[in-house]
Amino acid sequence: MYLGLNKNIKELDAYSILLIGFSISYYGVIFYLAYNLNVWIDEVVALNTSSGTLSYAIQQSFNYELQPPVYFILLTIWRIISLSIIWSRLLSVVFIIIAQIYLYKFSLKVVGYKIATIISMLFLLNPYTLFAILEIRVYALVLMISILIIITFYNSYYSAKYKAGSRILYITLAILGLFTQYYVGFLLFANAAVLLTEKKYKALYSYILDMSIPLIVLLFFVGDIIHSADLHQMAYPEKSHSTQIIFQEFKIFILQTFYNIIPLEINVPRTLVLIIRGVFIVYLGFSINYAVLRKDFRDCLPFIVISSICYAFFILLLLSFGETSVQFRYQMVLFTPLLFFLMV
C-alpha cells in the first residue's frame, strides 16, 4: 500500500513539474507576443467600444459590433486600470488561464494525471486557443465559458447532483454565455439532448425549468438582437449558392474544424501530406483499444451528442447564411465538446 501511494505521488510530481514548466514557458512566449504584436482592425474596434462608459459599451455592442455585450462590459471594467494595448490583451490571457485550470482539474478527476497533463498542453497549443489568447476580442471568453458550462453540466445535471448552488451557477453561466456569443445556445440545447438521450427525465425536467430563466432574460433584449441581426444581414447579404459551391463550403468547414482540433495541414508537397495523413490514420486505428472503447462508450456518449448537435446547427447556419456565419473565429463552441470527447 505504501509503495503504491509512493508511486502515485511520484507520478503526480513528474506530471505536475512537466505541466508547470510547459505552462511557464508557454505564457512567457504569449506575454512576449502580446507586448509586441500590432493590433488589427477588429481589435481597434473593440478598444473603441470599451473606451467609454458601460452604457456606451452596451450600445456599441448591439448597434456597431452586432454582438452581445458581456465581453465589452468586462473589457471596459478591465481597462479602468490601464488603457494600454498589452493590458487589454491580458484579459484574454486571464480567460485562457482560468479555462486551463478548470479543464485540468476536471480531467484529473475523470482520466488521471497523465491524460490531464496531455489534454491541458493540447488545449494551450491548439489553433483555437492560440488565436483567442492574443485577440482583444470575445473568443477567449467564449472558450472559457464553454468549458465551464460543460464541466458544470457534467458535475450537476448529468451526474444527478443538481443542488441549488450548482443550478444557480449553471443558470448564471448560461446567461453570461448567451450574452457573450449567441452560438453558446447550441451548447445549452445539446446538453438537454444529452439528458434526453440518457433517459435522465427528472434531470431534464429541472434543466428545462432552469433554462427558462436565460430564455426570459434573452426576451428582454429581443429588440436589440433583431436589430443587430438586421444590420448583420445588410453587411453580409445572403448569397445564392449552387449545389457545387454549397458542397465545397461544407467540405472546407468540416475539414477546417478537424484541422484545428488535430492540425494536419502543413506547408509541404501534397503527396507528403497525404502520406502523413495515411500513416496517422493507420497508427490511430491500430493504437485504439477497441475493447476499452466499447466499454467506455457510455462515458463518451454525452460529448458525442453535444458535438454532433453543435455541428448540425453550424451546418444549418452554413446552408442558410453562407460561410461568413461559420468562420473559424465563430467556431469556439465546437472546439470544447470535441476536446472533452478526445479526453474521455
Image (cartoon, rainbow, N blue to C red):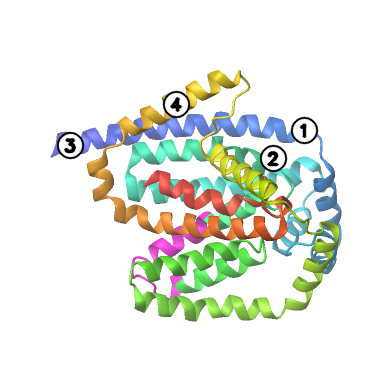
Q: Distance between the residues labelled 2 and 4?
A: 33 Å
Q: Residue furthest left?
A: 1
Q: Position of residue 273 (x, y in %)?
A: 54, 23
Q: Look at discs 3 and 1 and give the one toward the viewer.
A: 1
The mark found on residue 134 in the picture is: 2
By secondary structure, the bulk of the magenta-drawn segment is best described as: helix
The amino acid type, in three-letter code, at marker 3 is Gly
Question: Does the magenta run of residues contain 266?
Answer: no
Q: Look at discs 3 and 4 and give the one toward the viewer.
A: 4
Q: Position of residue 78 (x, y in %)?
A: 73, 54
Q: Name the residue under label 1.
A: 37
Q: How far apart are marks 1 and 4 (CA)?
A: 37 Å
The mark found on residue 46 in the picture is: none
Measuring 47% from the left and 46% from the top, which residue is drawn there?
339
- Could you tell which of marks 1 and 4 lies nearer the N-terminus? 1
Q: Is residue 1 left or right of residue 91?
A: left
Cβ–Cβ below 8 Å for labels 2 and 4?
no
Which quadrant is home to the N terminus?
A: top left
Measuring 56% from the left and 63% from the top, which residue is drawn there?
186
Q: How far apart are marks 2 and 3 (CA)?
A: 43 Å
Cβ–Cβ below 8 Å for labels 2 and 1?
yes
Label 4: few (<14), some (14–19) or many (≥20) C-alpha neighbours in 10 Å: few
The amino acid type, in three-letter code, at marker 4 is Gly
114 up-or-down from 224: above or below: above
Q: How far apart are marks 2 and 1 (CA)?
A: 9 Å
